[in-house]
Image: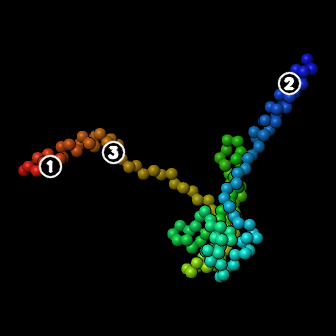
């Protein structure tokens, strides 16, 4: 009888701890931002793309049109049960280069500096009349003149 009580308490304690941990949030980290000590070594007007790449590494993102700015991005996401992940922290270091490839500016941004961009979910229909491939193939049979295709008049 005492064994059953101890076993029941053990199972109850295990279930209770499982329920508590199931409701706690988990965090994931993505990306890389160089430490402040490394960023202090990068000097505007002195360092170039090559020296920045040697000292802190090449970033995973750069400017879209031209590589005039390098972006180092790190973010922390909170996952809580079945809810969508939420970004709780973001750090961005933007290193801008002039036309000669020399460091022009270093900016540090956080999540509070960003803006939310909403994407449109509109979808362009490619086949307006819902014509199938087979129907298109059959409808083209009358258009081709086999006599002119074979070289006859």
Depth-wise, is mark 3 or mark 1 nearer the camera? Answer: 1
Q: Quick one: 83 or 140, which is closer to the camera?
A: 140
Residue tagged by mark 2?
Answer: 8
Badge 1 crowding class, 10 Å Cα cut-off, few under 14, some 14 to 19, many 20 or more, is few
Decide which of tag 2 and tag 3 comes sooner along the chain.
Answer: 2
Q: Residue furthest left?
A: 153
Q: Is 136 on the left-hand or right-hand side of 79? A: left
Residue 50 lies in quadrant: bottom right
Q: Is 110 on the left-hand or right-hand side of 100? A: right
Report if residue 113 is visible in the image. no
Q: Quick one: 40 or 81, which is closer to the camera?
A: 40
Q: Is residue 82 above or below residue 114?
A: above
In the picture, the quarter occupied by the N terminus is top right
Residue 40 position in % (x across, y down): 74, 74
Q: Residue at x 62, y 77 (%)?
A: 48
Q: Residue furthest right?
A: 2
As measured in the structure, the alpha-carbon distance from the residue carrying label 3 to the one carrying label 1 is: 30 Å
Residue 115 position in % (x across, y down): 63, 62
Badge 3 crowding class, 10 Å Cα cut-off, few under 14, some 14 to 19, many 20 or more, is few
Q: Is residue 76 above or below residue 147?
A: below
Residue 132 lies in quadrant: top left
As measured in the structure, the alpha-carbon distance from the residue carrying label 2 to the one carrying label 3 is: 66 Å
Q: Is residue 115 above or below residue 50?
A: above
Residue tagged by mark 3?
Answer: 129
Residue tagged by mark 1?
Answer: 149
Residue 12 position in % (x across, y down): 84, 29
Q: Residue at x 67, y 74 (%)?
A: 106
Q: Is residue 122 above or below residue 2?
A: below
Q: Are marks 2 and 3 in contact (CB under 8 Å)?
A: no
Decide which of tag 1 and tag 2 comes sooner along the chain.
Answer: 2
């Amino acid at each position: 009888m005492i064994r059953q009580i101890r076993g029941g308490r053990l199972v109850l304690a295990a279930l209770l701890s499982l329920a508590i941990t199931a409701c706690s949030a988990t965090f994931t980290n993505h990306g890389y931002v160089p430490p402040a000590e490394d960023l202090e070594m990068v000097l505007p007007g002195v360092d170039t793309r090559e020296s920045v790449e040697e000292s802190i590494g090449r970033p995973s993102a750069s400017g879209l049109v031209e590589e005039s700015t390098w972006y180092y991005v790190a973010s922390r996401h909170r996952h809580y049960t079945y809810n969508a992940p939420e970004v709780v922290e973001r750090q961005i270091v933007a290193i801008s280069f002039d036309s000669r490839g020399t460091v022009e500016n270093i900016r540090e941004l956080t999540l509070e500096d960003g803006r939310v961009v909403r994407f449109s979910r509109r979808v362009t229909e490619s086949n307006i009349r819902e014509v199938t491939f087979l129907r298109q193939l059959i409808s083209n049979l009358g258009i081709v003149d086999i006599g002119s295709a074979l070289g006859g008049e």
